[in-house]
Amino acid sequence: MECKKERNMKGCNCSYEPCSRKGVCCDCLSYHLRSRQLPACCFPDDAEATFDRSFDHFARLVSQGKI
């Protein structure tokens, strides 16, 4: 399978600048799921900027109607 990093970067809102996984969604998703987190693209920009990518944070945002 060919990586579509350039196309993926258009939808990547990760604000962690030294991230080596930006645009490489399969690596990003694997990394965050191992840590019981979701990747930045699952969060609105203001919530992503907190760097709290936990399942609990995501659930709170859903229950508040922010996602």
Image: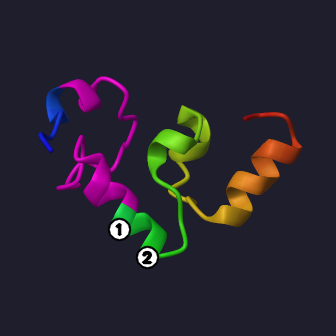
Q: Is residue 3 left or right of residue 35?
A: left
Furthest residue toward front: 1
Against 54, residue 34 (above or below) is below
* Magenta span includes 2: no
Against 18, residue 31 (above or below) is below
* Tag 2: amino acid: Arg
Q: Is residue 14 left or right of residue 42?
A: left
Residue 16 tag number = none
Please state which of residues 28 and 26 is positioned toward the viewer in this rendering.
26
**Where in the figure is residue 34, as x and y percent of width and height?**
43, 76
For the residues bearing labels 2 and 1, Cβ distance under 8 angstroms: yes
* Magenta span includes 20: yes
Please state which of residues 57 and 38 is positioned toward the viewer in this rendering.
38
**Where in the figure is residue 45, as x and y percent of width and height?**
53, 34
Which picture quadrant has residue 20?
bottom left
Q: Quadrant of the N terminus?
A: top left
Against 42, residue 51 (above or below) is below
Give the class, few, some or many, for how many residues have Cα within 10 Å of label 2's Cα (few <14, many ≥20).
few
Residue 31 tag number = 1
**Where in the figure is residue 26, as x and y percent of width and height?**
29, 54
**Where in the figure is residue 57, as x and y percent of width and height?**
70, 58
Residue that numbered label 2 is attached to: 34
Q: Main secondary structure of the magenta part?
A: loop
Against 34, residue 50 (above or below) is above
Secondary structure state at the residue bearing disc 1? helix
- What's the colour scheme? rainbow
x 87%, y 46%: residue: 63
Magenta extent: 7-29
